[in-house]
Image (tube, rainbow, N blue to C red):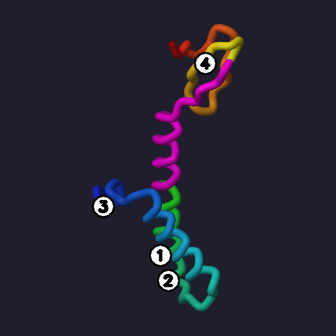
Amino acid sequence: MTDKENELKFEDAMIQLEDIVGELEHGDVPLEKAIELFQEGMKLSQLCSQKLEQVERRIEMIVEENGELRKKPFGSELDVNGGDAIE
């Protein structure tokens, strides 16, 4: 991944990806151009996926269990002894 791709914000990448999808769906794109657009779209899709994974790792959910608030990583199950009590 290039530095330019790393600097691209998620929202900007999604806009570019939507533009590419729109062009490809229109159907009048020459084959070579369609292949280039598809490849760029795949790169943008991968970038968005990576950015979402990074955010998911940082998000913590706060849940109430037995009258205590506990935090846990996004997407994980909180078992009886799991999570950290919030004081």
Q: Which residues, given as a range, are shown in magenta?
A: 47-64
Number of residues whose C-alpha sits closer than 10 Å to that of mark 4, classed few (under 14), some (14–19) or many (20 or more): some
Image-based side of 18 in relation to 64, left or right: left
Q: What element carries label 1?
A: helix
Residue identifier under label 3: 4
Q: Nearer the viewer, mark 4 or mark 2?
A: 4
What kind of residue is marked 1?
Answer: Glu
Which residue does the image show at 47% across and 34% down from the upper left?
58
Say if mark 4 contacts mark 3, CB within 8 Å. Answer: no
Q: What element carries label 2?
A: helix
Say if mark 4 contacts mark 1, CB within 8 Å. Answer: no
Which label sits on residue 64? none
Determine which quarter of the picture holds residue 71: top right
What kind of residue is marked 4?
Answer: Leu
Q: Which of marks 4 and 3 is in front?
A: 4
Image-based side of 66 in relation to 31, left or right: right
Determine which quarter of the picture holds residue 65: top right
What kind of residue is marked 3?
Answer: Lys
Residue 75 lies in the magenta stretch: no
Residue identifier under label 1: 36
Q: Which of 72 and 50 is in front in this view?
A: 72
Going from N to C along the chain, the mark reached first, 4 or 3, is 3
Going from N to C along the chain, the mark reached first, 3 or 1, is 3
Is 87 drawn above or below residue 22 in the view shown? above
Say if mark 1 contacts mark 2, CB within 8 Å. Answer: yes
